[in-house]
Image: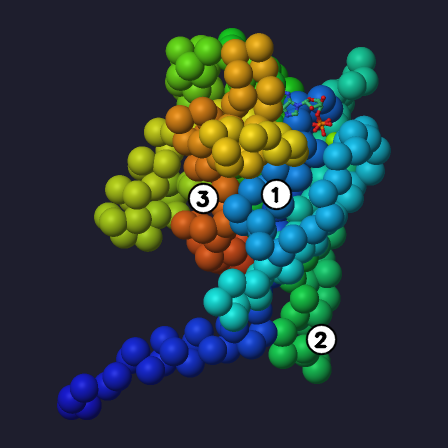
Amino acid sequence: LFGYVGIEAVLDQMKIKTMKTGFEFNIMVVGQSGLGKSTMVNTLFKSKVSRKSSQPEQEERIPKTVQLQSITHVIEEKGVKMKLTVTDTPGFGDQINNENCWDPIIKYINEQYERYLREEILITRKRKIPDTRVHGCVYFVPPTGHWLRPLDLEFMRRLSKIVNVVPVIAKADTLTLEERAEFKQRIQEDLKTHAISVYPQEDFDQDPEDRALNDRIREKIPFAVVGADQEHQVNGKRVLGRKTKWGIIEVENPAHCEFPLLRDLLIRSHLQDLKDITHNVHYESYRVRRLNESNR
Ligand code: GDP
Ligand code: MG
């Protein structure tokens, strides 16, 4: 009927549009205090994600996080601007009674949906609604080497209903490679037993190709990560790493830890998917819930 349509030209238009407006991507880190969340935020920004946008080298100690705090960097590559925001949260689980320790986190996530909803239901809407919604929530599991604790299960159960949860094994350098693999296996079993659906959720695979790719990721989740915000000299190169008695653990070296897998999943391979699921699934169910409430 049409002959050659030239859909490529449409792709170009989409690309130009994204280049002009840029896009927002928001990540949150949660977990008990002392598991390396704040360090991981720095690791993300200092790793190759944003090495080009040079920022002054800060070597000061990371203070204890006492409130929710967001850091935003605009990263520009090949003319496309990404506004990357990482929200750091104070550790929980420090109290004797950890009941409801997830409340502030869940409140924050819902507040961002609410903000978006309020803009969306205005009669005169902005052409582009500012997006502060959390697209990925990295949950830090303590490197006990045993099973998930009831607190981890409960927290992840609640979170996974409202946001994409990406669990990681924190401070993986404190475990041997065998311990990491075994712990990972147990965590996967635990999540399955308790029907906790972390990202990438099987229900949302779009086609067999997607499924095959995500199956490979699901086998590796939770990633055993190591964070560092100091650079060291290794073979004449500056690398981000931790100094231990066995030598330097290079956080960006896939042979040393799985931080590169986490970064690639979040910021490269699955960025658009994380945004899509946030909008089409998590935000959508918030929206339906809220509008039903107000119609009552
Ligand atoms: P937060 O409370 O979760 O924000 O944890 P911090 O980022 O403040 O880190 C707490 C302590 O753990 C600091 O002394 C960090 O240097 C250290 N740390 C952070 N990441 C790692 C890691 O991957 N491995 C090890 N061994 N220590 C880490
Ligand atoms: Mg902290």
Task: Evaluate if marks 3 and 2 touch, with contact meaning CB atoms under 8 Å apart.
Answer: no
Which label's residue is closer to the chain start, 1 or 2?
Answer: 1
Which label's residue is closer to the chain start, 1 or 3?
Answer: 1
Quadrant in which the C terminus is drawn: bottom right
Check disc 2 and give the amino acid type.
Answer: Leu
Circle 2: element type: loop
Which label's residue is closer to the chain start, 3 or 2?
Answer: 2
Specify few, some or many for label 2: CA neighbours under 10 Å numbering under 14, 14-19, or 20 or more: few
Report, in whole angstroms, how far the alpha carbon at label 1 lies from the one at label 3. 17 Å
Specify few, some or many for label 1: CA neighbours under 10 Å numbering under 14, 14-19, or 20 or more: many
Place of residue 80 in the rendered image (x, y in percent of width and height, measured from the top left): 52, 68
Q: Is residue 117 left or right of residue 275?
A: right
Kindly identify which residue carries mark 1.
46
**Residue at left 50%, top 49%?**
267
Task: Evaluate if marks 1 and 3 touch, with contact meaning CB atoms under 8 Å apart.
Answer: no
Place of residue 184 in the rendered image (x, y in percent of width and height, measured from the top left): 43, 20
**Which quarter of the figure has residue 153?**
top right
Query: For residue 92, which numbered disc appears in the image?
Result: none
Classify mark 3 as within 8 Å of ligand 1 or not, answering yes or no.
no
The relative height of residue 130 versus residue 141 in the rendered view (above or below) is: below
Check disc 3 and give the amino acid type.
Answer: Leu
Q: Is residue 293 left or right of residue 244?
A: right
**Residue at left 40%, top 11%?**
178
Check disc 1 and give the amino acid type.
Answer: Lys
Kindly identify which residue carries mark 2.
122
Ligand 1's image quarter is top right
**Residue at left 42%, top 81%?**
13
The relative height of residue 165 versus residue 155 in the rendered view (above or below) is: below
Kindly identify which residue carries mark 3.
265
Report, in whole angstroms, how far the alpha carbon at label 1 lies from the one at label 2. 39 Å
The relative height of residue 71 versus residue 187 in the rendered view (above or below) is: below
